[in-house]
Image (cartoon, grey):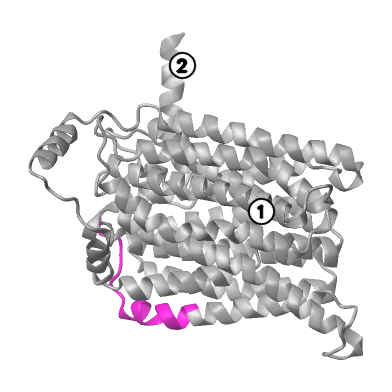
Amino acid sequence: MSSSTEELKRLFYQEVLPKLLPFSDAATRELPLARLLRLALFQASVGMMMVLLYGTLNRVMVVEKGVPPWLIGLMVALPVLVAPFRALIGFKSDHHKSAFGWRRVPYIWFGTLMQFGGLAIMPFALLLMAEGGSMPTFVTWLAAGLAFLVAGAGLHTTQTAGLALATDLANEETRPRVIALLFVVLNLSMLVASLIFGALLSGFDEMSVSQSNQRLIGVLQGAALVAVVFNMVALWKQESINRDRVEQIKADRQAYKEPPRFAETWAHFIQAGSATRLLVALGLGTAGFQMQDILLEPYGGQMLGLTVSQTTRLTAVWAFGTLAAFGLAAYLLGRRVDYYRISVAGALVGILAFVAVIAADPLGSPLLFRFGALLIGFGGGLFAVGTLSAAMNLADVEGSGLALGAWGAVQATAYGLAMFLGGAIRDLVTTITSSGAFGEGLIQNQAVGYAFVYNLEILLLFATLIAIGPLALKGGHAARSSSKFGLTELP
């Protein structure tokens, strides 16, 4: 019986899964697919939190609880205060001194604790902010802000250290594919989590206040527990005790050897290759794709009459588009296509996506709206894989933690700022429109604020093309490994 079970497991991991999951051929004898997918569970916890923070919660709080979009946008964007420190977190984990020789484990552990703590207190803070009570308003705002800040800090710390651990475990040839596989898992988890949260919140807008509050508390605190379980399973026996590193730490202390300084290391890294232009393009492109994140679900609810469950499932549509882009990117990178040109293609698809989203309201077409969401995910996926591949080619300059931390810092900072600005600009334009400044015919038109933001995103994507264009025109940027980057065939 056990031999047949082992044979089935072998067939699943070696024959079936590599044909279905993009970049699953990153597995090696030293890092088998089962261990790699278990490690990827930290990305599953991150993806689940992203669905909650950037999708489900903003729709529920804006539409059902009546919180102003600028306020919930500010709360969701608060983790941006932590995001710039991802490069520092990665650098510190590169040079962390532990009695066990661990570098990544302590950071993932404390990141997990912050994820749990933030999600555990979040529902109560949000309900106080939405419904008031005896607490002063500024206290409820501070409580909600603290919950988002702690949860976001945990998310960024866990993801940065987890990605660095994956690069430690992978060899140089498979390292880019391993990181890409982890982002596939991230998007798969977002897809699955959005479907689960959509089912759990089905009929939320028809519940009584007490029932809806209990459901929201249950969903958030259940997610906190799942995040801890996922991260602990992911971390189990991944980073072994390194006695050589322990002895080296002792020798450095006896010799009073100072660890490298972050400022000097960062200066060396930023001067290498095209790091500055890449990071500028990454920031512009991320903002161009993500400014809609806090608006897309309220837009579907207010303009197209979609329910909470239907708008939550938009994340699944978006994630499916991203996964399709990952599969295509794997195919193209395997054919040695320039990764900067893949990023350019993603930005062009993004421009078409926002045109479709804008047109959905005047045409009254939820189908066109969903198609636009699909294209946003597809274009964003191509752009992310292209820029991530470029960052991985800079990883050996000063260490994987710093390179991935820099990529993550710019992406997350642009993400958070874009979400806050998206909500704030939408509210500002709506206020100006309702005052009659743009004419009497637009006073009651709620779509103007949304359309303004979507057009701004199109301009940002054009700016991205200008920034990354010279690198794409130069050509010759392909994966360093002579072997294929991802799948040999599309999934």
Classify residue 257 as left or right of residue 101: left
Mark linked to residue 142: 1
Magenta includes 167?
A: no
Residue projecting furthest to the left: 255
10 or 396: which is nearer to us?
Answer: 396
Residues at discs 2 and 1 in contact (Cβ within 8 Å): no
How far from the left and from the top, in percent, is residue 143? 67, 49
263 or 366: which is nearer to us?
Answer: 263
Q: Amino acid at mark 2?
A: Thr
Q: Amino acid at mark 1?
A: Leu
* Residue at figure coordinates x 34%, y 74% from the top left: 276
How far from the left and from the top, in percent, is residue 456? 63, 80
Q: Is residue 484 visible?
A: no
How far from the left and from the top, in percent, is residue 4? 45, 14
Mark linked to residue 5: 2
* Residue at figure coordinates x 32%, y 58% from the top left: 403
Magenta segment boundaries in residue numbering? 464-481
Q: CA distance from mark 2 to mark 1?
A: 53 Å
Mark 2 vs 1, N-terminal side: 2
